[in-house]
Amino acid sequence: MHLHPTESLCCFVVLVCLSCTLHDIEVTDAAAEDSTTSQATTGSNHQDNAETSEERPGLDSNPEDATLATNDGNDPGSGTASSLSDGVNDGWIGGSCHSDEDCRYQGGFCLTEVDGFPGGTCSLACESQCPSPAAPTHTSSGCIAIDKVSSREGSSCIASCDPSADESGCRPGYRCTRRLLFQYTSRSIDVCLPDDVAHDQEPLVAWVAEASGCLAHLATLDLPIESTEHTASNPACAIEYPVLFPAILNGFTFFNSAGQATPLKISCRMAVALMRMIDVMHDLGLDNLTHLGVYNCKVSADGKPSRHGMGNAIDVAKFHGTDGTTYTIYQYYFQNTDVGRMLRNIAEQLHQHKVFNQVLTPEYNEQHANHFHLDLTWPEYPNEWNKH
């Protein structure tokens, strides 16, 4: 059988087209398989990240203003950060940077070498919490005060240590160090800070072994708490290592019954307790309180001073929430309402965290119907934690 030249050409074209179609099908199937594998791997990474991420003070709040920006290669900072690091935290908090453009998320800025950070590090302004990692290659971060470690003031998100990325947990030129979370005195986080400024900042402990060591312990925190002199009309009302506690500290305010924010004269140990109390207040969403009195020289018939007479007590009449809610003890404590339940929870949290030895509520007696009496029974009963 003989084919006309034109017919032969047509058969050749058909065979070529059929071959191309079969090849396309094979490529498409392979690509689909690769895509499925990639999606499964990515899903696993996100799942692992979700399981290991937990929300805690100063960490992982994922605010909307810190969404990672998409970099299409046209961004002025495109490629800059990746050329400085191994890809960990690239364009994210803790990643290397030369300028703010290298920090590719809303509100991001670069703590440069001028600020004291070798190779620069991306950061974000914060008041209490930092955003959750936006990708599997990102580490978490913590909100800490940076005015003691850089030329900048205020607080910023700093990358936490990640031993899985590097044995030291940090980039070259940085060291893993423990720092207090911003506005906290008893909670800390391990973050990556420059070698020349990295030093551990230990959180407050519930008690200081020796009372004489209390002032030295407070001094390490760089807080505006000053030693003061104290002379009482009655010698029984002696304050052990008296200090002036600021009315406003770590974003929390102490008002007296006249609505004034004035310093409190208390013992050094009581200062430690109030700072730990502030941490609990922040956790509960409270930013100030109104007290009825702190130091007051009261002496019993047998000549013993009350806890107020030793500068070891405070009477609180109401608390105020960051949302504007006022929690008045006399009015709401026994009510089965959100406000009433909140007041009872405040007392319970102060008790559970062992902030004070004695937490006396309106349940104790009529004399405490309008306030919480919070005191330290040190040194007589240092290990008793009572709530009534």
Image (cartoon, grey):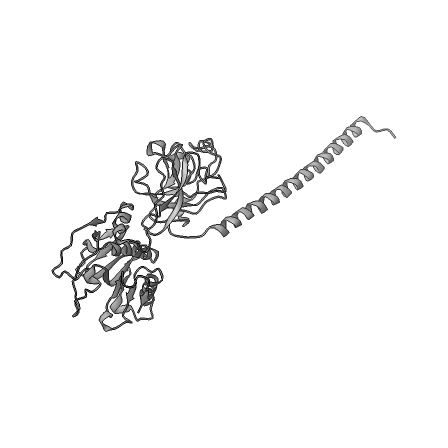
Name the image quarter holding residue 211: bottom left
In the picture, which quadrant includes the C terminus? Answer: bottom left
Give the image location of residue 250, x and y in percent.
28, 50
* Along the viewing direction, whichever of 212 and 33 lies nearer the viewer: 212
The residue at the point 25 percent across, 49 percent down is 215
Name the image quarter holding residue 209: bottom left
Give the left or right position of residue 98, taking residue 45 as reference.
left
The residue at the point 21 percent across, 57 percent down is 255
* Along the viewing direction, whichever of 11 and 239 lies nearer the viewer: 239
Q: Up-down: is 366 above or below 170?
A: below
Name the image quarter holding residue 119: top left
Q: Is residue 289 visible?
A: yes
| The furthest residue to the right | 1
Q: Up-down: is 315 above or below 122?
A: below
Give the left or right position of residue 300, taking residue 134 as reference.
left
In the picture, which quadrant includes the N terminus? Answer: top right
* Along the viewing direction, whichever of 251 and 323 lies nearer the viewer: 251
| The furthest residue to the left | 233
Q: Up-down: is 189 above or below 9?
A: below
> What is the total number of numbered labels drawn onto the structure image?
0
* Along the viewing direction, whichever of 279 and 217 lies nearer the viewer: 217
Give the image location of residue 217, x and y in percent.
29, 48
| The furthest residue to the top | 5
| The furthest residue to the bottom | 366
Q: Is residue 293 visible?
A: no
Give the image location of residue 53, x and y in percent.
46, 50
Give the image location of residue 212, x and y in percent.
25, 51
Give the left or right position of residue 11, taking residue 244 as reference.
right
